[in-house]
Image (cartoon, rainbow, N blue to C red):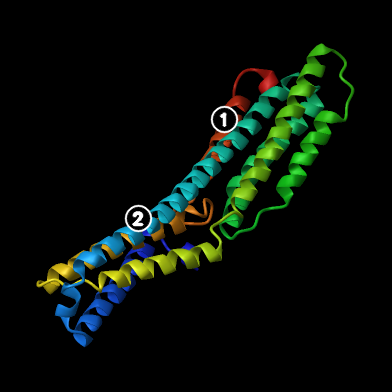
């Protein structure tokens, strides 16, 4: 349900709830206990929160970098998969007309399936099984004939290689859609955020407004990082998701080739 929310809306809601908790908790703690009891422990508390904050920053930063790299890798995998489809379409040039037409029709059908069906299904965490059938049909068309000359042999070998790349790219993309931060990791992150936020309450300042501002700043930074991490962990399901632009480009490229004057490109 949270993945369906636009990133900016999720950020606003998360910040509101986090600030309500942080500022409300600080006001309650300082209302119950004498504020001057906290002032005398500021120096010791500063060293402790510096150590705790550094440890939490390392953990949060490391997971954010991992999620960011996962997102970037997923984008690259989509690009490589689409490139493999385009290369296959061109590699089929030397195949006999009937086999060439079948392979190219499969590739165009596959690209349209990605845009119209699979991308919406991936946002729901699933995929369209007919994509595998289309690839297997193209592999069957390219591999089930005996080359009559060197041109056909070279074209067949290159087409089969590119179809293998296409199949591997599909598997990588579907795997990218399944990998995310585990529930245990989220528990550890939230426990760390809770400890850092609550520790901010244990300081004492003569100006309460300044103290609330400092606590709010820490809360905003942590919350914003957690929301960013949440969005990056799902490359195809969050509002920051990778779109099917590469496949739209494949379709446009194929149509451009088919509209050309070269008969071999039809």
Label 1 CA crowd tier, 10 Å (few <14, some 14–19, many 20+): few
Q: Which residue is mark 2?
A: 54
Q: Nearer the viewer, mark 1 or mark 2?
A: 2
Give x and y (percent) for residue 153: 82, 18
Q: Residue at x 58, y 46 (%)?
A: 115
Task: Classify mark 2: helix, strand or loop.
Answer: helix
Whichever of callouts 1 and 2 sits on the residue coming sooner in the sequence is: 2
Would you place residue 6 above or below residue 258 in this image? below
Which of the 4 quarters of the picture holds residue 86? top right
Left or right: 266 in relation to 249? right
Residue nearest the observer in this picture, 27 or 178: 27
Residue furthest to the top? 150
Q: Secondary structure at mark 1?
A: helix
Q: CA distance from mark 1 to mark 2?
A: 50 Å
Quarter placement of the C terminus: top right
Query: Residue shown at 21%/71% (left/top)?
Result: 41
Closest to the observer, 30 or 4: 30
Q: Position of residue 209 (x, y in %)?
A: 13, 71
Give the residue at x 82% y 33%. Answer: 141
**77 horizontally vs 265: left or right:** left
Residue ID for mark 1: 253
* Figure check: 163 above or below 171: above
Residue 142 visible:
yes
Residue at 30%, 63% (x, y): give it.
Answer: 49
Tell how many labels: 2
Residue 216 visible? The answer is no
Q: Position of residue 252 (x, y in %)?
A: 55, 33
Q: Are marks 1 and 2 in contact (CB under 8 Å)?
A: no
Question: In the visual, does 1 lie left or right of 196?
Answer: right
Q: Of 225 and 163, which appears nearest the observer?
A: 225
């Amino acid at each position: 349900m949270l993945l369906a929310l636009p990133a900016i809306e999720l950020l606003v809601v998360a910040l509101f709830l986090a600030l309500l908790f942080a500022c409300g908790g600080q006001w309650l703690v300082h209302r119950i206990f004498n504020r001057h009891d906290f002032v005398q422990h500021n120096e010791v508390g500063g060293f402790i929160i510096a150590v705790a904050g550094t440890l939490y920053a390392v953990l949060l930063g490391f997971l954010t970098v991992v999620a960011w790299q996962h997102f970037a890798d997923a984008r690259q995998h989509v690009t490589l998969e689409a490139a493999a489809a385009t290369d296959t379409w061109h590699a089929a040039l030397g195949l006999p007309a009937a086999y060439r037409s079948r392979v190219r029709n499969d590739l165009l059908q596959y690209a349209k399936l990605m845009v119209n069906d699979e991308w919406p299904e991936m946002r729901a965490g699933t995929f369209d099984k007919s994509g595998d059938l289309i690839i297997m049909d193209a592999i069957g068309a390219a591999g089930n004939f005996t080359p009559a000359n060197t041109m056909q042999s070279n074209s067949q070998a290159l087409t089969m290689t590119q179809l293998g790349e296409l199949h591997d790219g599909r598997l990588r993309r579907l795997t990218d859609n399944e990998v995310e931060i585990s529930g245990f990791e989220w528990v550890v992150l939230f426990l760390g955020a809770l400890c850092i936020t609550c520790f901010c309450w244990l300081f004492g300042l003569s100006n309460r407004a300044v103290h609330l501002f400092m606590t709010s700043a820490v809360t905003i930074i942590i919350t914003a990082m957690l929301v960013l991490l949440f969005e990056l962990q799902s490359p195809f399901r969050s509002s920051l998701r990778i779109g099917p632009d590469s496949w739209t480009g494949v379709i446009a490229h194929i149509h451009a080739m088919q509209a050309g004057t070269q008969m071999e490109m039809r």
